């Protein structure tokens, strides 16, 4: 991961922390950009977990991320989940959860 990409992820994380000060649970980058096996067309997979997630929250998250995309040109592929949904993934040890646990790079974790 390059410095500019890390700065972008930090900006997104800080914006989300301001938007959801009591409900943001996690921000985790994952996928080929984190592993380092990406090509020029690869996007940045980003998991955003919010407690008591609403449709309005999802729209707000997308606005933050698309705003950063416009500024930097870095393409993001957000996965937005409620904390309850993510906890279910964790309890069932789904492939998605195992992938996040194995390769995910945490930018924010309210529970650590």
Image: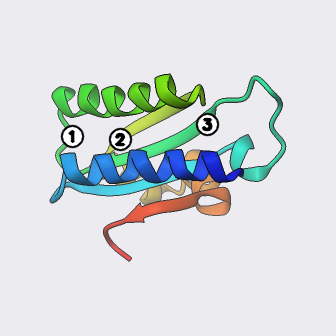
Residue of label 1: 53
Q: Quadrant of residue 48?
A: top left
User: On the rendered structure, is 17 left or right of 31?
Assistant: left
Q: Position of residue 69 (x, y in %)?
A: 50, 27
Real-space Cα separation, disc 3 to disc 1, in angstroms: 22 Å
Q: Residue at x 41, y 62 (%)?
A: 108
Mark toward the viewer: 3 or 2 = 3
10 Å neighbourhood of mark 1: few (<14), some, or many (≥20)?
Answer: some
Of label 2 and label 1, which has the lower sequence position?
1
Of label 3 and label 2, which has the lower sequence position?
3
Tell me if residue 97 comes above or below residue 38 in the rendering: below
> Where the C terminus falls, by quadrant?
bottom left
Residue of label 3: 44
User: On the rendered structure, is 43 left or right of 40?
Assistant: left
Residue of label 2: 81
Secondary structure at numbered mark 3? strand
Tell me if residue 1 comes above or below residue 65 in the rendering: below
Secondary structure at numbered mark 2? strand
């Amino acid at each position: 991961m390059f410095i500019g990409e890390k700065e972008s992820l930090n900006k997104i994380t800080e914006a989300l922390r301001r938007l959801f000060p009591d409900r943001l649970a996690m921000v985790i980058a994952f996928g080929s950009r984190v592993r380092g096996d990406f090509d020029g067309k690869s996007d940045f997979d980003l998991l955003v977990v919010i407690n008591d997630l609403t449709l309005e929250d999802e729209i707000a998250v997308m606005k933050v991320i698309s705003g950063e995309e416009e500024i930097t040109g870095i393409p993001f592929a957000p996965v937005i989940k409620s904390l309850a949904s993510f906890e279910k993934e964790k309890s069932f040890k789904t492939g998605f959860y195992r992938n996040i646990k194995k390769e995910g790079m945490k930018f924010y974790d309210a529970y650590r």
